[in-house]
Amino acid sequence: MSILLVEDDESIAIVITAALEAEGFHVDRCDSVAERDRLLAQNAYRALVTDVILTDGDGIETLGAVRALHPKLPIIILSAQNTLDTAVRASDTGAFEYFPKPFDLDELARTVHQAIGAGSAGEAGLDEEPDGQGLPLVGRSAPMQAVYRMITRVLRNDLTVLILGESGTGKELVAEAIHQLGQRRTGPFVAVNTAAIPAELIESELFGHEKGAFTGAVAQHIGKFEQAAGGTLFLDEIGDMPMQAQTRLLRALQSGSIRRVGGREEVRIDARIIAATNKDLEPLIAAGQFREDLYYRINVVPIHLPPLRERPDDIEALARHFLGLAANEGLPRRHLTADAAALLARQPWRGNVRELRNFIYRLALLAREDMVDAAALEPLLAQSARAEETPDEAATLDGAVAGWLRRTNPAQGTVYDTALAAFERPLFAQVLASTNGNQLRAAQVLGINRNTLRKRLGELALDPDSFVRRG
């Protein structure tokens, strides 16, 4: 079986070729759009594996001609441009799969086998290409690449999505991206924070009510389900929904219709449902606080959003993105030096992207110079840390733990692991700072083996060299 590999990086091409040939494939290689088209015209291939940036053009933009001439050819796209826009562009070609670099060679080989077995994979694209530019999802880290790939998998269907993640990770932004890029993008996007609605009003808000249904119902009210007709209904903080409303929601999802409070008419649902929560729902189910059948109904496609501490490589890009947004909104245009960006990446950011965004806006307002270095950042970071704690909390470890628990409110059953993860990174950072980045000395201070320290530093994405004071 012959495969065409289009890759302009010779070393990567050699490695991929070896991996595919080990699986029994014959591989032809080239590095340009022109040579790709020539080989496709002369030979019959079972699959096309292509990079995006080629020597003479964009490997995605030029796939239209390939699709026209070879509609059943499975296409697998590779890219070092690990953004949501690239993932969406790859999906819009009808590609069988998209792999952000670096990727697992065994997984690539398995996918080539699957693509050949599946036959045509590109006949279900949209007539109109959605625009992925300008979406407020920033980051090229491996955890975010996994999120982007999951988003692209739900754009061509109306499957119910459950977005899971800590507060401040950007769950509503992911929901908006799915809506804006999906087949319901011309319809409304209706967001409901179920935790912010009083329990006695939530059914009326979701399903609407008829005039006279209850005291104060002086007119008919159209609920969020009907407002979202033709579009997307985003149910945020669904883990806080009252049990009675959970029962009504489950009935609506099962039947595909709703009934306004006080009404008799069944109204068909015509909205995609996306739910989100910052809580672990399984312990809530065990405690009888969340319906298990509703959980399985909404958890058709789960998307796990990583906390910011698990994607420190994205912090600099996020910070610069927020500085640009702040400038667009009328605040002074600020810039970060490399040491300032490194200092931001070492912070715990317990409030995740939301906390970082608020800090960057505050920085844009309060910084004295347009170019902000680490020395200028430190007092602002210290001020932010003090603002998160009451005066007596800041003075004791017990108080700090109490403040942390109050602010983060980790889900039942996760407090121990979550607290250890939150405490370990700043602890290691402080010790490394005090030992000038010396790992041997830091291990001695901590009372742990140096290999253990090195392993944990890698897992926590802490670079000891960044703590070395130079000059």
Image (cartoon, grey):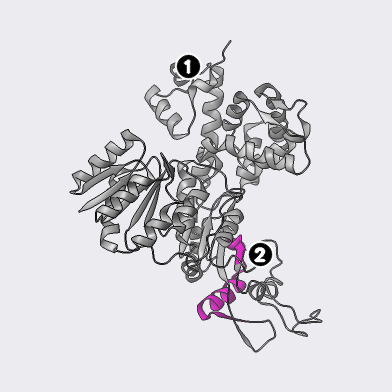
The answer to whether one can see residue 308 in this image is: yes
Quadrant occupied by the C terminus: top right
As displayed, is residue 465 above or below residue 307? above
Distance between mark 2 and mark 1 Cα atoms = 50 Å
Tag 1 residue: 438
Q: Measuring from the top left, give residue 280's x and y in whole percent.
A: 51, 56
Q: Does the magenta stretch include residue 247?
A: yes
Q: In which image quadrant can residue 234 be found?
A: bottom right
Q: What type of secondary structure mainly makes up the magenta span?
A: helix
Residue placed under numbered mark 2 in the picture:
192
Whether 318 is drawn above or below 377: the answer is below
Identify which residue is drawn at 44% across, 34% down.
459
Location of residue 350 by image quarter: top right
Q: Position of residue 274 (x, y in %)?
A: 56, 64
Q: What stretch is highlighted in magenta?
A: 233-258
Q: Which of marks 2 and 1 is in front?
A: 2
Callout 1 environment at 10 Å: few (<14), some (14 to 19), or many (20+)? some
Q: Residue at x 55, y 55 (%)?
A: 279
